Amino acid sequence: MGGVPASQPGLARRALARELRTKGVDSTLIDDAVGQLDADQEERTARELVERKLRATRGLDQEKRIRRLAGMLARKGYSEGLALRVVRRALEEEGEDAELLEHHLPDL
């Protein structure tokens, strides 16, 4: 059974590359694997992660929800800009007040 070892689901490209390096995977294989992931796919994956976590944050104040959702993405290696953009979009689609969101998440 060869190939690349399994990693945590939903990792951003840079976090995936770091994890594979720590597991001793050849850097050429890492470059090939990570190079196949594009920015659109990375954003879709981030969005899926946020959607799964949204329900668990309902009832919390908006600032706490934003911190939890963005923090979850940050721990998986997503950039702050991407994380905040995805969180803002998800909360807007859920019906959060855009004006209040602007206070915590200026237009990105």
Image (cartoon, helix red, strand yellow):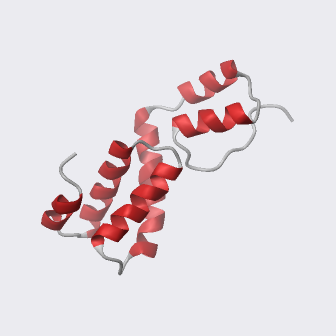
- Among the 4 quarters of the image, the one containing residue 27: top right
Classify residue 57 as left or right of residue 12.
Answer: left
- Among the 4 quarters of the image, the one containing residue 66: bottom left
For image coordinates 32% across by 60% down, the residue present is 90
For image coordinates 48% across by 64% down, the residue present is 52
For image coordinates 68% across by 34% down, the residue present is 20
Q: Residue furthest bottom?
A: 59
For image coordinates 53% across by 49% down, the residue present is 76
| 36 up-or-down from 68: above or below | above
Q: Position of residue 99 (x, y in %)?
A: 12, 64
Q: Position of residue 75 (x, y in %)?
A: 52, 51
| 62 up-or-down from 30: above or below | below
| 11 up-or-down from 30: above or below | below
Choose between 76 and 35: the one closer to the eye.
Answer: 76
| 29 up-or-down from 57: above or below | above
Assign the C terminus to one quadrant of the image.
top left
Assign the N terminus to one quadrant of the image.
top right
Q: Position of residue 80 (x, y in %)?
A: 37, 45
Classify residue 90 as left or right of residue 53.
Answer: left
Q: Position of residue 59 (x, y in %)?
A: 35, 81
Q: Residue furthest right?
A: 1
Choose between 68 and 89: the one closer to the eye.
Answer: 68
Total labels drawn:
0
Choose between 47 and 85: the one closer to the eye.
Answer: 85
Q: Residue furthest left?
A: 99
